[in-house]
Amino acid sequence: MVKYSRLGSRNQMTFSQWQGKQPNNCSATSMKTSRRHFLKTTALTLGMPTIIPATVLGRNGAVAPSNRIVMGGIGIGPRGREDLNAFLKQSDVQFVAIADVQEERREIVRRMANRHYGNEDCSKCGDMFEVLGREDIDAVLIATGDHWHALATILACKAGKDVYCEKPCSMTICESQELSDAVNRYGRVFQAGTQRRNVDNFRFAAELARSGRLGKIHTVHASILRLEESFVWLPAQPEPAVEVVDWDRWLGPAPWRPYNKSYVQGRWRGYYDFHGGAALPEWGAHTVDICQWAASADHTTPIEFEAEGETIHARYASGVKLVMRLAGFSGEGNWVVPGTCPVRFEGDEGWVEAADSGKLAASNPALLTGSPPQAAGTDPTQHVRNFLDCVKSREKPAANADVTRRGHIVSHAASIGWRLKRKVNFDPATESFINDDAANLMRSRARRAPWHV
């Protein structure tokens, strides 16, 4: 198997150190010299002319191995493959390994990568710890089911990997906190797959709100899915061989239940154990996140939440209102702009809407002067590029762990209020409900052994 050069260590903890093994101070990694440095110094010592391929130095459009980001994947299904396509298009990425509990999926991804590179260098395995334990891997793409996102991210951070994780990134308020704490503790670069932060029409709309061109913002609207959840089990089916589907590992931290192929085929949505927050975080991870940004509230959360039928009303300490309501395509829910995931920002002097169609609408057409060309809101390309640039610079990406923490907490807190069928008051400083034991008990869930942080 080919070993690819990786970026500098960047003060990362190795996987062996996390496992409690004695680190080797004279490891092969620490003793490696870059090929470019080796060739130059050898030539000087021997007095020989230096002839170095341009691909090694990064010329002629090639990326030098020392600047290449080596990546692996964990649990990559249909949406994850859209992300992977965006990563494969980047010339400074080398995707070398896929871990998935389903043989069919890991083989699809392995072939996808090898077909792109024209070789057989991408490996596959059923155990994510094999990928996390590879010292040549800089970063991982995590696109498992929702119930694995937070824990897999935490394990990756402990293993010294940067992380691009699909959304929603947590099942509870406490998981949102644990994920953010781990990213910061281990000094990793993290990007949530809330790609609309890097989609032009959403960015344009948010900037209109933040710049004051709409006047003082008083209400932001986030589209959500229908609020519902199920506690039933699908009928038990014969469990496949572990080499085909590792059902116990697929469940991971979730409560045990008998195998049914629908779960592993992606139809786990709507079931409480696998799909947090009455499905609210599914859309809220995108739309509530953008509303937080537009309201200049990335540092905080609303202080109260109250459900009214299928709509949830929230209010920030600043007085700005957040309305989470049903939406879909053109016209549904009284949205002006067609497309999924619409958002609307209202100020004293006007309003603007954006949606996945790439279109914009505003109270005054003049507000849209200079608006960007249409682009699908589901396209992760610019978001992926933002992540990779930050892996190199060590800056925080647009959807970093702190932004994700508070945006996800808003969705989880809103869903708790909906479940309790009453108004709940929330303290953004402590990230807990005020004088409400029942609501606070719902901030976390038990994890099945041995999957504990």
Image (tube, rainbow, N blue to C red):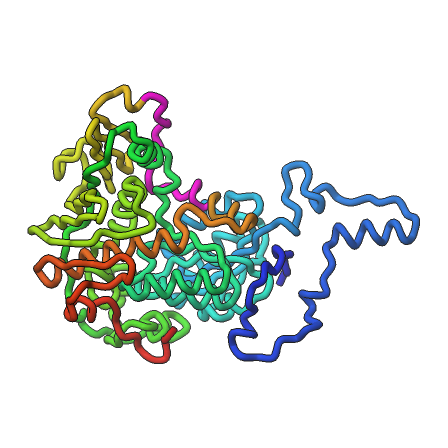
**Relative depth, front residue between 390 and 123:** 390
Find residue 376 and report its horizontal and vertical position in percent.
34, 36
User: Eyeballing the image, is 200 above or below 226?
Assistant: above
Asked if residue 30 lies in the magenta stretch, the reply is no
**Residue drawn at (40%, 65%) of the image:** 152
Asked if residue 371 lies in the magenta stretch, the reply is yes
Q: Is residue 68 left or right of residue 299?
A: right
**Residue drawn at (26%, 45%) of the image:** 287
**Relative depth, front residue between 371 and 48:** 371
Find residue 90 and report its horizontal and vertical position in percent.
53, 44
**Prevailing SS of the magenta stretch:** loop
**Relative depth, front residue between 316 and 306:** 316
User: Eyeballing the image, is 375 above or below 19?
Assistant: above
Query: Quick check: can you spot residue 21?
Result: yes
> What segment carries the magenta color?
369-384
Query: Which quadrant would residue 252 be assigned to in this image?
Result: bottom left
The quadrant the N terminus occupies is bottom right
**Relative depth, front residue between 202 and 218:** 218
**Residue drawn at (24%, 54%) of the image:** 410
User: Eyeballing the image, is 123 above or below 315?
Assistant: below
**Residue drawn at (48%, 70%) of the image:** 129
The quadrant the C terminus occupies is bottom left
Number of labels in the image equals: 0
Find residue 74 and report its horizontal and vertical position in percent.
43, 62
Query: Which quadrant would residue 266 be assigned to in this image?
Result: bottom left
Find residue 442 and report its horizontal and vertical position in percent.
20, 68
Query: Quick check: can you spot residue 232?
Result: no
Query: Which quadrant would residue 170 be assigned to in this image?
Result: bottom left
In this view, which residue lies farthest toward the right?
47
